[in-house]
Amino acid sequence: MKNPIADLNKIFDSRIRLGVMSLLVVNVKISFNELKEMLALTDGNLASHLSTLEHAQYLYVNKSFIGRKTNTTYGITPLGKQAFKIHLDALEKMIKSI
Amino acid sequence: MKNPIADLNKIFDSRIRLGVMSLLVVNVKISFNELKEMLALTDGNLASHLSTLEHAQYLYVNKSFIGRKTNTTYGITPLGKQAFKIHLDALEKMIKSI
DNA sequence: AAAAGCACTTTGTTTTTCAAAGTTATAAAA
DNA sequence: TTTTATAACTTTGAAAAACAAAGTGCTTTT
C-alpha cells in the first residue's frame, strides 16, 4: 500500500492557510480585513500565514487605495492554484477509498 | 460568509494523524510496524501521534501475540470514526464550493 | 551468548504557532 | 490641531508541536 500522505503539501497542513486558500479560490480577491474577519484571527497571525503563502508564491498581493485609504487585497497565483489542486487531489484520494 | 475552518478538528491538522485515520478507516486494524512502514516514520514519531489519537479516544489499541511475539494493532473507535467524518465533511464543504 | 525485532518512552533540539505590542501611514473626529 | 481610529503590518517572546535519536524491556532468532 502506498504512503497516503506523501503527496500532501506541508504548507497546507495549517488550517488557517487551508482556509485562506479555499476562500481565495472561490473569491478571486479578498482584502486583509475581510480575511481577518472571516477566519477570526489576530492581525499578526493572519499576516504571518499570508507571508508564508506569499513566500511560496501561492498568493499575490495588491496594494491599492480606496480614496486615499490603503486597501490590500490577496489573490491566488497560478502556481498556488496548481499546488492547492494537487493537495486537494491527494486528500481526495485518501478519502475516496473510505 | 461563514468561517470555513471553524469545523475542522485540530487533531486532524497533522498530516500524520490524518494518514493514520484514513488508513484505519479502510483497514479496520493495522499493526504498529505496518503503520510505520506505510507512513515512513520513525518509531518515536509514530508512537507519539498514535498516543495523541489514543488519548482523544479516536483509536483503541490491541496487544496480542503472534506465537510468543508481541503484536500491537490499532483500530478506530466509534468516536474516532464520527470525529473523522465530521472533519472530512467540513473539508468537503470547504472544497466543494470550488 | 549475541544480535535483532517490537513497541514503546525519554530526551533534547528545531520548528511552528500565536498573541500582544509596537510601527507607519492615513483619515476622521473633537 | 491634538486626539483617536483604522489598515496592514513587523517584532518580540512564549508556548506548543514535531521530530530524530537514543534508551528500555521483552522476546526470538542465530
Image (cartoon, coloured by chain):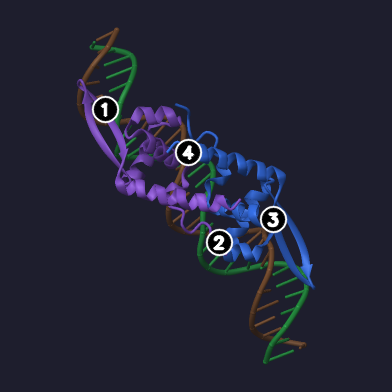
Chain colours: A blue, B purple, C green, D brown
Q: Residue type at mark 2?
A: Leu
Residue under pointer 4: A96
Q: What is the C-alpha distance between the residues marked 3 and 2?
A: 17 Å
- The residue mark sitting in front, 4 or 1, is 4
Above or below A74: residue B15: above
Q: Residue at x 73, y 66 (%)?
A: A71
Q: Is residue B83 left or right of residue A47?
A: left
Q: Secondary structure at mark 2?
A: helix
Residue B20, by quadrant, is: top left
Q: Residue type at mark 4?
A: Lys
Q: Secondary structure at mark 4?
A: helix
Q: Residue at x 37, y 27 (%)?
A: B34
User: Would residue A77 be seen by someone viewing this image from the given angle?
Assistant: yes
Q: Of marks 3 and 2, which one's residue comes earlier in the chain?
A: 3
Q: What is the C-alpha distance between the residues marked 1 and 3?
A: 52 Å
Q: Chain of mark 1?
A: B
Q: Residue type at mark 1?
A: Asn
Q: Label 3 crowding class (10 Å Cα cut-off): few <14, some 14-19, many 20+?
A: few
Q: What is the C-alpha distance between the residues marked 1 and 2?
A: 44 Å
Q: Residue at x 44, y 47 (%)?
A: B12
Task: Using the image as rendered, state which of residue C12 and residue B71 is in the foreground.
Answer: B71
**x, y percentage for residue A49?**
60, 54
Q: What is the C-alpha distance between the residues marked 4 and 2?
A: 27 Å
Disc assigned to residue A17: none
User: Would residue A9 be seen by someone viewing this image from the given angle?
Assistant: no
Q: Chain of mark 4?
A: A
Residue under pointer 1: B71
Residue under pointer 3: A28
Residue under pointer 2: A39
Q: Chain of mark 3?
A: A
